[in-house]
Amino acid sequence: MLEKLVRHDAEQSVLGSCILDNNSINKVLFLNGSDFYSPHHTVIFNKITEMYNSGKPVDMITLAESFNDDELELIGGFAYITDLAKNTGSSANIVAYGDIILDMSNRRKAIISMNESIDKLCDIKESSINVINNLESELDKTFISAAEADVLSASQLIDMSIEEMEYSQSNARIGMSTGIDEIDQRLGYKLMAFGEITALGGLSKNGKTLTANTILARADYQDNESAHVFSIEMPTLGMFNGIISAMSGIPSNFYARQEFYQRVFGSEYDSMMAKWGRAAQELNKSNRITIDGKKQVDADYICSNMKKQFAAHRNKGKRLRLVVLDHLHRMDYKTEGQPLTYAIRDAVRKIKNTAADLGVAVVALCQLKNDAEGKDPTSFYILDSSAVRHEMQAFVGTRIFRQDGGTYFGIYADSQRYGDMDTLHVPAYMKLQGGVLKSLSDGEYFTPANEE
């Protein structure tokens, strides 16, 4: 039974984070070596804290050299220490993983205490009162241990705040740009924040998937960063070509209407094909985006496969940084007698927690209620669940205008958790040309007509 109450990945991530970033060690000193299930993890953590408390630097080499040959062999050698560091993306989520380790440890300790008490209660020679009192005492210790991990003193909070100040001064990466200025300016200073959900909402046929594809194509990926898409609504091929369209400027249905484009565009067709091909090859060579086209999925599937894709991308030398969910209202929900709005809220919360564990930014497309027709979209119009507002970092609304012989695209935002003095709250307008989203050129303006 106790073997089920183990998170080896959390234990490895905490140790790897300590090796990568010595400043993070202080954040998990609420743990003891005995909280780790694996004996070799206990040995490694005890050595790390011993070195840290002695003021010694901790890295792969100094840690390995601190063990004698027998101890080093016991923990798996220098290769295992190297793997711990190599397989940990960053130390950003070390506290979350530490909380998981402590939770698992407390569960195991409680079960052991209760099993020992059951054995004693079955022995009539033992005093039942003493056994119960001892059990209560042991459970109280476990409860206090769990509670203390969540309580921080003012001194600890000051130290943590100073660390965050120093971290932010170095232009630390806490989120990623969408690659669309009109959206970035309305998200808040963290942009698409890692560990958070950006809700992208609109009525049907108002550009949600178009915007998501444009973000996937233009996002500010750093070297070896990648994205994964859950294409629950859009056919996989359509999603792929939507991304190609945003990269190349070629209409997204180019792949499906060859006779039409050859006939209508004539001499320009070869150039269009060349642009499509270059974008497709660029996407292929970068190995940056993967797409899951399964349609019948629930939150458990999404969260499980986010973790699997995180590992799969890492095995290919990539760091999963962006997940797009197209879209929220196409998922299956286990209502179990409760209102659908609660089931959606619980699912979004589960996805957000997984995003925080992995340190990825999530864009979740949301359907809006028909009440939003003819109005500026806001998070209050999200279908079936205004509770989604409480789980997201920001809402970005999209709306299409066909006016003055052109097609224009409105971008709206509200509910920004990281909104600041430089965050814009007024709508922005772009244009659609050939199904491709483009910024208005200098001196070009758009104002929705009054009847809109």
Image (cartoon, rainbow, N blue to C red):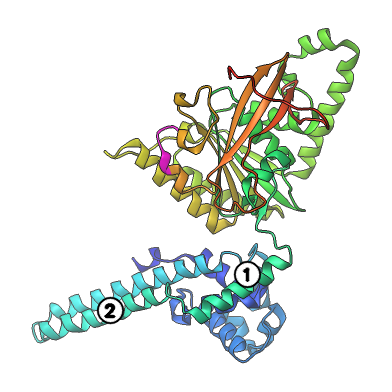
Can residue 341 be seen here? The reply is yes
Instruction: Left or right? Give the position of 275 relative to 117.
Output: right
Quarter of image, res 424: top right
The dominant secondary structure in magenta is: loop
Tag 2: residue type? Answer: Asp
Q: Could you give the CA–CA distance between mark 2 and mark 1, rounded to whole angstroms?
A: 34 Å
Callout 1: helix, strand or loop?
A: helix
Residue located beneath label 1 in the image: 164
Give the residue drawn at x 60%, y 54%.
194
Nearer to us: label 2 or label 1: 1
Q: How many marks?
A: 2
> Which residue type does callout 1 highlight?
Glu
- The magenta segment: 383-387
Residue 36 image position (x, y, % from top left) = 47, 75
* Outermost top residue: 263
Residue found 70% across the figure and 53% down from its top = 318
Residue annotated with mark 2: 140
Q: Residues within 10 Å of mark 2 (few under 14, many from 20)?
A: few
Q: Residue at x 81, y 27 (%)?
A: 276
Front residue of 47/330: it is 330
Q: Is residue 256 magenta?
A: no
Task: Note whether residue 382 is visible.
Answer: no
- Residue at the image point whose x is 68% and y is 16% from the top: 403
Q: Quadrant of the C terminus?
A: top right
In the picture, measured across the screen, residue 114 lies left or right of residue 29, that is left
Label 2's element? helix
The percent coordinates of residue 349 (x first, y second) are 44, 49
Where 89 falls versus 51 (above or below)?
above
Above or below, comparing residue 323 to residue 77 in the picture:
above
Residue 112 rendering spot, x and y as whole percentages: 29, 75
**Between disc 2 and disc 1, whose residue precedes?**
2
Picture quadrant of residue 150: bottom left
